[in-house]
Image (cartoon, grey):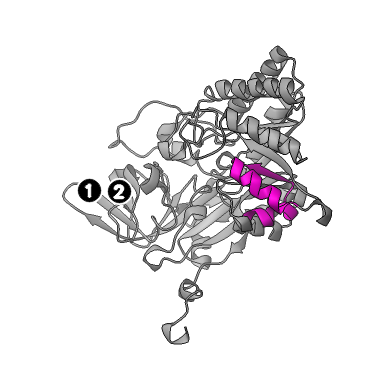
Amino acid sequence: MAGHTDPGSEARDPNAGVDAARRLSLFPVTARVTAAAGNDRLQIGSCDLIELAEQHGTPLYLYDQATLDANLRAYRQALGEYYPGQWGITYAGKAFLCVALAQWVQERGLWVDCTGVGELAIALAGGAQREHILAHGVNKSPADLASAIPATGTIVVDGLVELQRLESLWAPAQGPTPNLWLRLRPGLAVETHTHTQTGQEDSKFGMNESEALEAIRFCREQNLPLTGLHFHQGSQFRDPAPIGPALEKALDLAVALRGKSDWLPQVLCPGGGWGVPYHEDDLPFPPISNYVRFVAEHLVEGCRRRALPLPRLQLEPGRSLVAQAGVALYRVGYVKHTAHQRWVLLDGGLADNPRPALYGSRYTALPALNPGRPGAGPAWLAGPYCESGDILIHDLPFAGVEAGELVAVPMSGAYQLSMASNYNGACKPAVLWLQDSAAHLVQQREQAGDLFRRDIALDEV
């Protein structure tokens, strides 16, 4: 994570006071508290959050370009320092993708991975170049594959059936065709929530070694442009150690393939998934450079021991690029006291951020006005939806707030809007892009009419 210095790491009593400085370190790198009209106000990218909410309403999502650039810089600096071969970075579109973000990806020379026709369409609308688009996903539909062949530079093949479907759709004479990578299932997952582990032996993703060997033989027989190997072990991890054995398995497979078919991967992609600190209790969090250095040094040493040429190393960060750039801004409806809990009821939650309900994810928050004010005991920040699980933050030491105040939740840039729903008829929030001290509307707020735009009345059927 780029940006602020960690103020310390000692454990805290949940009933203790608010450590505003520690929480502020989780916000975008441009976050500042400034004095105005006798009050302190939270700013991001030189934009006042209270003014943004007045202009655009809430819930409201903010994306700070300076933070995206800082995190990308950290990846590039680490890759340049630790990997002597060719390397590249692929933005994981599933973390969050809109036209503006696709434009940022293109302007920065990144690749973007797209799962399905929908993400591919967004990337193309943002001007992503064909050679920079990578098609991902398990159980790609015929429509997904048919769209990916002419529009992408690389397709990551998840299984033998998918490979056979691809071959049946292949028509090289019609124009340029994408390279193919095979997705391996290394049988090893990283330490993270079970819902975000992808590399274990019983995972739905990828191929085992014997399946990969058969896929490679098929590609050779059919003269398909196979150029790389890919694997992914999970998302939101902070210890890169499990990547080591998976790299060893991938390189052992490369040695076996060289002996049996004289084929070697030009590209090796160990996926992504490096995590971020969502809550102050996650601090200190290991920096991006720890992850990159581990992968790069293990790959270099593994190739040296096997007398293999260094492949192009392609990393796929999504969350670790974009999560810190995003802030969710909510308005307090009212505060309710029950026998043992103080409920701060917000105008958003489960519909725009299902992660606490899905994964038990822990977030933190600060008031936008006077964020450094003393705590008033623990609070449960919850949304308006008809689910008891609609609790954004549990048991958080929090200031005393009143109806109408604004609450800012950091680390909201990844896997929130991309997983958002219209549950209870919720309209998806507006999104602002903060750049050069200005806020640009890049996604309009949904309106009620958008919710039934696809519907057909019975009397019209």
* Quarter location, residue 29: top right
Is residue 240 shown left or right of residue 382?
right
The question of residue 227 being in magenta is answered with no
Q: Is residue 437 visible?
A: no
Is residue 170 shown left or right of residue 141?
right
Q: Is residue 267 visible?
A: yes
Please tell me which residue is depicted at 42% across the width and 36% down the height of the picture. 193
Q: Earlier in the sequence, mark 2 or mark 1?
A: 1
Please tell me which residue is depicted at 75% across the width and 27% down the height of the picture. 263
Q: Secondary structure at mark 2?
A: strand
* Residue at which label 1 appears: 341
> For this rendering, which residue is in front, 8 or 122?
122
Q: Secondary structure at mark 1?
A: loop
Is residue 88 shown left or right of residue 138?
right
Q: Amino acid at mark 1?
A: Gln
Residue 65 percent coordinates (x, y): 64, 49
Q: Is residue 224 above or below residue 173?
A: above
> For this rendering, which residue is in front, 274 or 259?
259
Please tell me which residue is depicted at 72% across the width and 23% down the height of the picture. 260
Residue 278: numbered disc = none
* Quarter location, residue 253: top right
Tell me if mark 1 has few (under 14), some (14-19) or many (20+) residues whose alpha carbon lies within 10 angstroms of its own.
Answer: some
Residue 322 percent coordinates (x, y): 58, 45
Residue 183 percent coordinates (x, y): 61, 36
Q: Amino acid at mark 2?
A: Trp
The question of residue 159 being in magenta is answered with yes
The answer to whether mark 2 and mark 1 are in CB contact below 8 A is yes
Tell me if mark 2 has few (under 14), some (14-19) or many (20+) residues whose alpha carbon lies within 10 angstroms of its own.
Answer: many
Quadrant of the image for the N terminus? top right
* Residue at which label 2 appears: 380
The stretch in magenta equals: 144-170
Residue 419 percent coordinates (x, y): 48, 53
